[in-house]
Image (spheres, rainbow, N blue to C red):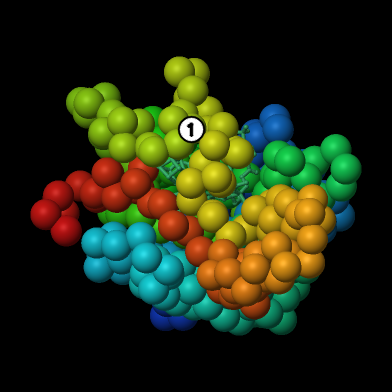
Amino acid sequence: MALRSGDKDEIRERARSLGADLVGFLNLRDYHSPNSPDPRNWLTDSRSLVILVFRHLYGAFDTDAWSHMHSYMYAPEATAIRAGYILAKSLEDGYGGRTFMVPLHRPFEMDEDSYRMPRGMVSLRHAAVQSGLAVWGRNTLALTPQYGPRQWFLGLLTSLDVETDAPTVGDYNPCQTCSFPCVDACPGNAFTEDGKTISHRCVRNSQGHDPGHLMRFLVELLDQPGNEERKAMLRSASFINKLQNLHGYLNYGCTHCTRACPPLGQRSL
Ligand code: B12
Ligand code: SF4
Ligand code: SF4
């Protein structure tokens, strides 16, 4: 089924009332992300993508301690999931389009070939740029005129046929006149000259207790000479932090490339 522009306005309004800060529409004809899987793997008759934007709190960036995560991610993510689910149901019930929620980050589909270099189900940065909401930044994040890089994206794949939005970025192109503090600020030296992020360099710095670190911890545990050394490792803060991460409390302990790039007009925030 095809949506009219009045329908798009209604959906946009509903998304905003559920907490989305920005909303974009992208027809899959206009989606190009050569390193990403085909969206039809996830929803066989998908035709379009609705992109919802949830900004971080401006107060999320004075510290990278674990406690910043509510302001930085948990609350925007929880809002995104709730808003996305309610909106997805209204796309299904109100407009007759089957709809699939694209995860914000985890879980990844991982196998022996891909687990070292995880990919999203849909590249939400490509989608945000191609829907006209954002531009690519030198930090490889998608920058919106409203929030710079300081937002999360949620995608709704739908079988509805929706026209791609006209771009809303205007002449916004902040990297053109910038000295790349985001690149200099990266403690992991994760950015390549040709505009890519080396995943493992970022993860080593930013996700100190993620499943990859847990895997290495367990391998190291097995390599210990005796049980006393193993017990000491299991009683360490490092292990309990990894368990806390497993509990669902993901920690991004580095956000330097985001905080180096405040949104336009909010350089003091
Ligand atoms: C895997 C992943 C990662 C991996 C990145 C691996 C990678 N190289 O893409 C790691 C662990 C490093 C990572 C880190 C972070 N991530 Co992340 N991540 C994802 C995830 C789940 C999938 C990305 C993916 O599929 N990549 C594989 C393919 C698409 O990448 P690619 O084609 O090779 O493209 C790369 C380059 O070629 C380049 N690129 C491609 N085309 C073009 C064009 C131009 C002009 C330029 C300049 C660059 C460029 O950009 C890509 C990055 O290297 C997305 C969510 C999603 N579903 O999209 C979130 C996502 C990209 N992450 C996000 C965030 C916030 C982060 C962190 C800031 C988290 C933190 N530490 O606090 C860091 C930022 C690191 C950084 N500056 O890139 C947000 C970005 C929001 C935004 N404003 O853009 C996303 C969209 C999650 C979300 N739902 O909002 N992430
Ligand atoms: S800090 Fe400057 S170079 Fe880096 S993404 Fe932001 S505007 Fe672009
Ligand atoms: S999150 Fe930290 S380690 Fe990762 S790319 Fe950004 S600045 Fe570098």
**Is ligand 3 less than 8 Å from the beta carbon at label 1?**
yes
In the rendered structure, the answer to whether residue 18 lies left or right of residue 59 reads: right
User: How many residues crowd around disc 1 within 10 Å: few (fewer than 14), some, or many (20 or more)?
Assistant: some
In the image, residue 8 lies at what x, y percent? Answer: 52, 64
Label 1 element class: loop
- Residue appearing at x 73%, y 41% in the figure: 116
Q: Is residue 250 visible in the rendered structure shown here?
A: no
- Residue appearing at x 22%, y 28% in the figure: 178
In the image, residue 5 lies at what x, y percent? Answer: 51, 60
In the rendered structure, the answer to whether residue 217 lies left or right of residue 207 reads: right
Determine whether 153 is above or below 189 in the image. below
Q: The disc labelled 1 sits on which kind of residue?
A: Ala
In the rendered structure, the answer to whether residue 249 lies left or right of residue 151 reads: right
Position of the N terminus, as image quadrant, is: bottom right
In the rendered image, which quarter is residue 201 located in?
Answer: top right
In the image, residue 175 lies at what x, y percent? Answer: 29, 30
Determine whether 128 is above or below 78 in the image. above
* Residue where numbered disc 1 is placed: 190
Viewer-side residue, 163 vs 28: 28
> Exactly how many numbered labels are in the figure?
1
Q: Is residue 152 visible in the rendered structure shown here?
A: yes
Position of the C terminus, as image quadrant, is: bottom left
- Residue appearing at x 26%, y 33% in the figure: 181
- Residue appearing at x 24%, y 61% in the figure: 62
Viewer-side residue, 83 vs 132: 83
Viewer-side residue, 106 vs 236: 236
